[in-house]
């Protein structure tokens, strides 16, 4: 009975993932995206998806690890260019602590308390784009300050809010 139930969960999770990834091609805002879905049976991880896509003229490699209970639980792990997304959140928050007031990890879609079965790969990709934009925020802030100092003696910190 347990084996039959496990096969049902795996097949329903697999079917859900296949359908989600088929829908990606229909979305116009996501272009130049390729993906491979791997079946892994090692403990809690059942599937891994490798995604390559271009965003802001750069290529990103995404790895998403799904467990047996997906879509009822969030993906186990998400890596952007071999960096764990939660490590990236910590780095972003430390570099932009004066600008960001909330914890990005707690607001993340991938946090178990924010995840729901209605979420899918499209929502995850939107989250990834947000992380990439936040990661570039520190560089944009530095550039803005250099430009402002070159042309004026006033502090223009209020302009940093527009970079978000």
Image (cartoon, rainbow, N blue to C red):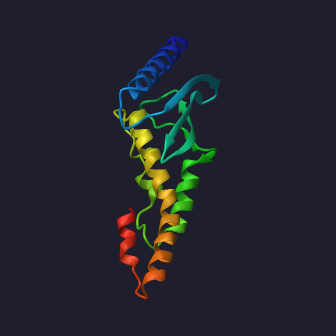
Number of numbered discs present?
Answer: 0
Residue 150 position within the rendered picture, expressed as x and y whole percent measured from the top left: 48, 81
Q: Please tell me which residue lies in front, 9 or 85.
A: 85
Q: Classify residue 22 by image quadrant.
A: top left
Name the side, left or right, on which 151 lies relative to 52. Answer: left
Q: In this rendering, is residue 27 above or below 113?
A: above
Q: In this rendering, is residue 48 above or below 163?
A: above
Res. 111 in view: no
Q: In percent of the image, x 52 and y 14: which residue is there?
A: 7
Name the side, left or right, on which 11 lies relative to 45. Answer: left
Q: In percent of the image, x 43 and y 70: which residue is there?
A: 99
Residue with the most extreme front position: 151
Residue 106 position within the rendered picture, expressed as x and y whole percent measured from the top left: 44, 55
Residue 41 position within the rendered picture, expressed as x and y whole percent measured from the top left: 63, 23
Q: In percent of the image, x 36 and y 26: which residue is there?
A: 26
Screen quadrant of the C terminus: bottom left
Q: Please tell me which residue lies in front, 63 or 110.
A: 63
Q: In percent of the image, x 56 and y 42: which residue is there?
A: 60
Res. 102 in view: yes
């Amino acid at each position: 009975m347990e084996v039959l139930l496990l096969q049902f969960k795996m097949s329903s999770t697999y079917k859900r993932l296949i359908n989600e990834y088929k829908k990606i091609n229909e979305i116009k805002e996501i272009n130049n995206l390729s993906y491979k879905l791997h079946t892994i049976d090692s403990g809690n991880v059942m599937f891994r998806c490798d995604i390559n896509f271009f965003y802001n003229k750069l290529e990103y490699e995404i790895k998403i690890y799904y467990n047996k209970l997906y879509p009822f639980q969030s993906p186990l792990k998400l890596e952007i260019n071999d960096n764990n997304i939660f490590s990236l959140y910590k780095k972003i928050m430390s570099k932009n602590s004066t600008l960001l007031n909330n914890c990005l990890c707690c607001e993340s879609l991938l946090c178990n308390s924010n995840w729901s079965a209605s979420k899918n790969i499209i929502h995850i990709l939107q989250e990834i784009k947000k992380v990439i934009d936040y990661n570039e925020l520190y560089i944009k802030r530095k550039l803005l300050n250099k430009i402002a100092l070159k042309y004026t003696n006033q502090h223009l910190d209020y302009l940093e809010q527009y970079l978000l």
